[in-house]
Image (cartoon, helix red, strand yellow):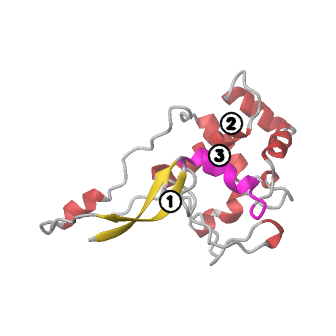
Amino acid sequence: ASVLTATRTEGAAIVGTLTRVEVQPQPPSTLDQLKSLYRRPTSISFPENNPYTPGKAALGKQLFFDTRLSGANLLSCASCHNPAYSWSDGQPKGVGHGMNVLDRRSPTILNSAFGRVFMWDGRFASLEEQALGPIQAAVEMNLSLDDLVRRIGGVEKYVSALAEIFPGEKITAQNIAKAIATYERTVISGRTR
């Protein structure tokens, strides 16, 4: 059987590579065997370069809901990933900076801790990378990373929190992203039966 696959190289997905894969017939699986293939991990893994701390998750939550992360001070991450709409926006297509209707709907961030690629096209390999993408995208939140750092650096509660969480480091877009990504990893769906 021929299968259309997507492969990753250097953080981007190459879609449309035709690969011939021989599929061997498998014996029927029991329901329990099938469920085991899709069972959610029992714990959240955090990257070595961004370990979990309660303070970092709390800062990430504040940043996630803060409209200062957008150029016009009108949008936050939660504008498109709203907890009231299962961490999406309930719209067929997202709405970004200047009320621009985007090309795609806003995906949920539920269980993103278990993701391996991010954004619809797979262009980001980590939540830390993904957190900065929409902030600096002109059609989404429209705030340059330099302006993000300046703006966050002007808010005393963020300056204090970042200094405590990242001691001896300057305020950087990467550390802001680490805080947001840490919070996003804690947004996990409830257990079902």
Disc 2 or 1, which lies upstream in sequence? 1
Q: Residues within 10 Å of mark 1 (few under 14, many from 20)?
A: some
Q: Quadrant of residue 167?
A: top right
Q: Which numbered mark, 2 or 1, is in the foreground of this view? A: 1
Q: Residue furthest bottom?
A: 92
The x, y position of residue 35, in whole percent, is 27, 62
Q: Secondary structure at mark 3?
A: helix
Disc 1 or 3, which lies upstream in sequence? 1
Image position of 25 (left or right of 73): left
> Is 165 situated above or below 11?
above
Near-viewer residue (46 or 183):
46
Residue 73: image tag: none
Q: Amino acid at mark 1?
A: Ile
Position of the N terminus by quadrant: bottom left
Residue pictured at 54% horizontal, 49% vertical: 11
Q: Secondary structure at mark 2?
A: helix
> Is 21 situated above or below 58?
below
Let me know if residue 131 is in the magenta part. yes
Q: Which residue is mark 3?
A: 180
Q: Can the viewer see residue 147 in this picture? A: yes
Q: Secondary structure at mark 1?
A: strand
Let me know if residue 139 is in the magenta part. yes
Residue pictured at 77% horizontal, 33% vertical: 171
* Magenta span: 125-140
Near-viewer residue (23 or 178):
23
Q: Which residue is mark 2?
A: 175
